[in-house]
Image (tube, rainbow, N blue to C red):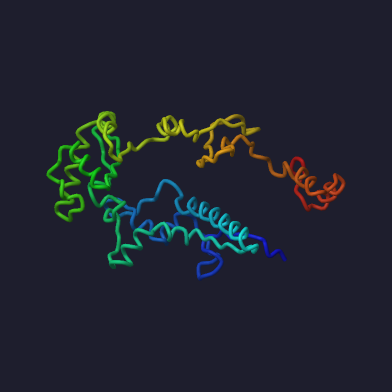
Amino acid sequence: MNPRLVYCAFEGFGANGPYAGRPAHDLDFEALSGILSVTGSDDGRPVIPGVPIADLASAFNAAFSILAALRRRDATGAGEFVDVSIFDTAISLMVLNFARYLGTGEIPVPGETLVTGQWAFYNIYETKDRRWLSVAAVEPKFWARLIGVLGVTEFEGDQFAGEPVRGQAIAAFRSKFHSRTLDEWTSVLGREDIPWAPVQTLPEVVKDPQVLARGLLVDTDLGRLGKHKVLGHSAKIEGVRTDARANVPKKGEHTAEVLKELGYSATEVGGLKKRGVIGPGPGS
């Protein structure tokens, strides 16, 4: 009826296939896509990520796909049906692991991929005061600086070494990082041009100077809920407000206002409400 219409189905498994219509949550998508097979503890038990990765990534995927369809409509005049699946998105997040498996036949497992702690240069280490920090010295220049700071230059040519050297390097790094507190390492590493970071708790994150400088937390009036600090929009677009000042509307709060803008009279709105076409919320 409207060939210019762009509309999106955003479902767990998409519009077709044997899993279509099957109930699932983020954890299930992470399991089925293999994410949990490469994210585990030393004893082999899969570890559940602290955020719903598949759900959130799929929301971005849906938004980008809809915008791409709108841009294509600008060029062609034709709309289209956008079919976004949380499962499909979760599969796409496994790109590095699929590249390894499809290219070499090797099956990635926890602790044996580039991004899950296989090597010393990309890992998580405990400090003397039982805090944690991350190190991601992937490029050779960062690796050289890191082993210099730690005083383990005997591993200079062993960044990508196999066993047993790989394990020896990780053990040496663990011992070094465990010799000082997080504050002490912050003082040392903070002077170096090396990719590293403390593992921060949320109370620390909300006070982080970069979070404050980027305006990622804003004070907003939530109406009946009062004033609260909330997450602002993560994208900075010149000329577009991102301060999240709009109140969350109550159910049906703006129904009458929207219908009036569409040309409905007060009498017609009242008739729709009486017949149950619109809900009984405020303003409806």
Residue 119 appears left or right of 273: left
Say which residue appears at 28% left-offset and 37% top-offset.
193
Say which residue appears at 19% left-offset and 41% top-offset.
147
Q: Quadrant of residue 132?
A: top left
Q: Is residue 14 above or below residue 40?
A: below
Residue 23, position in %: x, y? 53, 61
Q: Quadrant of residue 143?
A: top left
Say which residue appears at 59% left-offset and 37% top-offset.
241
* Outermost left residue: 154
Give the position of the N terminus as an image quadrant. Answer: bottom right
Q: Quadrant of residue 80?
A: bottom right
* Outermost front residue: 75
Residue 66, position in %: x, y? 58, 56
* Outermost right residue: 267
Q: How many marks?
A: 0
Residue 183, position in %: x, y? 28, 29
Q: Is residue 230 visible?
A: yes
Q: Is residue 182 visible?
A: no
Q: Nearer the viewer, residue 233 or 133?
A: 233
Q: Is residue 5 above or below residue 222?
A: below
Q: Nearer the viewer, residue 204 or 242?
A: 242
Q: Nearer the viewer, residue 283 or 4?
A: 4
* Outermost bottom residue: 18
Say which residue appears at 27% left-offset and 29% top-offset.
187
Give the position of the C terminus as an image quadrant. Answer: top right
